[in-house]
Image (cartoon, grey):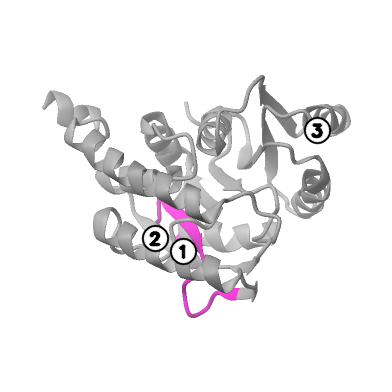
Amino acid sequence: MVTDGGVHLSVVIPAFDEVERLGPTLEQVRRFLNTRRFESEVVVVVDGGRDGTLAMTRALAREWPALVVLHHDVNRGKGYSVRRGMLAARGRYRLFSDADLSTPIAEVKRLIDALDGGADVAIGSRALAQSDVRVRQAWWRQSMGRVFNQIVRRVAVPDVRDTQCGFKCFRAEAAQRIFARQRMTRFSFDVELLWIARKLGCRVVEVPVTWINDPSSRVRPVRDSLRMLADLVRLRFDDLRGLYEDEDERTG
């Protein structure tokens, strides 16, 4: 079974040294979920760190039964944390969101509508005409992002305009199949997830969302972009080795 009880929506949030931002984020998520009629859970994966994030989330979980806290003793990477949270989640629909909540949690309604409409994976996009980007990144971050996106579209997922928005929702069955095959643990995991989804024949839909840039983002454009480009090469190599194929394809 990939669902448990009546959990309709799981919200997975990776967190590394997020004690300042995570508290307000969880409060917003809690207020939103309290207005919904379905059962939900929030899974926070504390990825190491020493700033008190783990203590804060554990204290909150003691009076919020729907909050599940997982943790790593050492930093394992955002991709690793998202994978662990999504595979531990119990919901029919499973969303992962950045800890800064650059995309407001209420936007999940748009993604669920897309899943109810037949998609297996619904991803928030800042690149569509209907997207509402209220606070933009610095011009040089935008330029580097556009260059990286063009490379990604040529090498990996040509029909996805925004692979890096940290707001993606999956049907439970798709989440189990995709995240079980995920191998990348850092920022390139978003591209890898979409690559795997395509390999498995999942229907991926981009959904316009509201997005507000957080200037305190920990992404280091130059170093992380170089690492991500190297990961694209690794992705294609792993694909040639058959690591992303469905079990039926391996044995058929």
Distance between the Cα atoms at labels 3 and 1? 30 Å
With 149 as the anchor, is 87 left or right in this view?
right
Say what secondary structure mark 2 lies in.
helix
69 above or below 102? Answer: above
Residue appearing at x 27%, y 34% in the figure = 244
Residue at x 51%, y 37% (from the top left corner): 79
What residue would you read off at disc 2?
148
Callout 2 amino acid: Phe
Is-magenta flag for residue 26?
A: no
Q: Position of residue 172 (x, y in %)?
A: 48, 39
Residue drawn 14% across and 23% down?
Answer: 251
Give amino acid for label 3.
Answer: Asp
Residue 8 horizontal/vertical position (percent): 61, 43
Judge by depth and name the residue closer to the eye, 46 or 50.
50
Of residues 189 and 248, the one drawn nearer to the viewer in this rendering? 189
According to the image, label 3 marks what residue?
51
Asked if marks 2 and 1 touch (Cβ < 8 Å), the reply is: yes
**Marks 2 and 3: CB-CB under 8 Å?**
no
Q: Distance between the residues labelled 2 and 3?
A: 32 Å
Residue range of the region highlighted in magenta in the rendering: 117-132
Q: In the image, residue 36 lies at what x, y percent? A: 73, 53
Specify whether residue 95 is in view: yes
Q: Name the residue under label 1.
A: 145
Foreground: 136 or 14? Answer: 136
Give the dominant element type of the magenta stretch: helix, strand or loop.
loop
Q: Where is residue 17 in the image (x, y as percent from the top left)?
A: 73, 37
| Amino acid at the residue labelled 1 | Gly
- Work out whether 133 lies above or below 56: below
Q: Would you identify the image quadrant in which residue 160 lies?
A: bottom left
